Image (cartoon, helix red, strand yellow):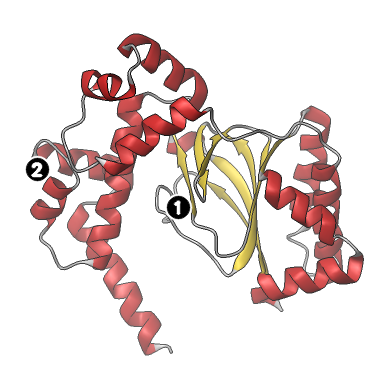
Amino acid sequence: METDFQYRHTVGKDSLQNVKHSHNAVEILFVQRGRGVVTVGEHIYPLSPNGLYFIGANTLHYTAPVENEQYVRSVVNISTEYFSCLCEVTGYEEIARRLQERCCIMSDGEAAARVSAAMERMQSEDLRERVRALLDVLEIADSRDIFVPAFESKVSEIMAYVNRNIGEPLTLDGISAHMFIGKYYMCHLFKRTTGMSIAQYVLLQRLSLCKRLLLSSDKSISEISMECGFSSFSYFCRAFFKSEGMSAGDFRKRFAEKRIMYVKNG
């Protein structure tokens, strides 16, 4: 039963930040501090304090906070089968459907305090108390009319263009020319909407791709850095160490060892 219902409170960086991933579980993310973006499927939402994010099972998603040390959140993962059964028994099926459809909901001060208290109750060893806390979160979120749509199309287009061309040299002039939008207005719009600069977003995406390639390919680290669009290997090394707190080689070795341990332990 423990594996069906998992809660964790995290401060700072974790291994799945800036990495697209999915679970065979419904995920509820509550952000206490931090700014950036949350990508869920094909949609991109602002990552903001008091934000609640409802992510459907097996949906690709990732968070990209601007400053890791400022990122504080609580996360609940409930297995697909357990969540479906729970909603059916309690009559919360329609509420769950609405919340996953809306995905991103902003809480005001009072609602955020109630959500935070309910999230803390999910640490209880009593499963019934954890279930009651989960239902409280669903009710609080569903009572809020402040749900946040995905970013406006122009910002999403900029992100999509960056993602498609992440291995190529990217300049503000080149992006603005492709978008048929003034460079300075584009930068202002992007920063105002996402809380980060275009340069910060490009770096996050390049590092994300690097980590995927380090774990899924046998290419050399220098090859990977070039494939991900870094202008020099030395710049890549500095950026990777600053982001992960370790070298790319140590990152690859650490996760390779984890995979071996997992296989051995069956």
Q: x%, y% of residue 213?
A: 24, 59
Camera-near label (1 vs 2) is 2
| Dot 2 amino acid type | Phe
- Quadrant position of residue 64: top left
In this rendering, the answer to whether 3 lies above or below 229 is: below
On screen, residue 194 versus residue 28, left or right, reads left
Q: Secondary structure at mark 1?
A: loop
On screen, residue 201 versus residue 174, left or right, reads right
Question: Marks 1 and 2: CB-CB under 8 Å?
Answer: no
Q: x%, y% of residue 17?
A: 43, 49
Q: Secondary structure at mark 2?
A: helix
- Residue at coordinates 89% horizontally, 71% vertically from top-left? 89
Say if residue 133 shows up in the picture.
no
* Residue situated in front as seen by the camera: 120 or 169: 169
Q: x%, y% of residue 118?
A: 80, 50
- Residue at coordinates 44% horizontally, 47% vertically from top-left? 13
The residue that mark 2 highlights is 233
Say if residue 102 shows up in the picture.
yes
- Quadrant position of residue 45: top right
- Residue 14 tag number: 1
In this rendering, the answer to whether 127 lies above or below 105 is: below
How crowded is the residue under tag 1: few (<14 C-alpha within 10 Å), some, or many (20+)?
Answer: few
On screen, residue 115 versus residue 91, left or right, reads left
- Quadrant position of residue 105: top right
How crowded is the residue under tag 2: few (<14 C-alpha within 10 Å), some, or many (20+)?
Answer: some
On screen, residue 155 versus residue 81, left or right, reads left
Q: Quadrant of the N terminus?
A: bottom right
Q: CA distance from mark 1 to mark 2?
A: 25 Å
Q: Quadrant of the C terminus?
A: bottom left
- Residue at coordinates 27% horizontally, 72% vertically from top-left? 256
* Residue situated in front as seen by the camera: 38 or 184: 184
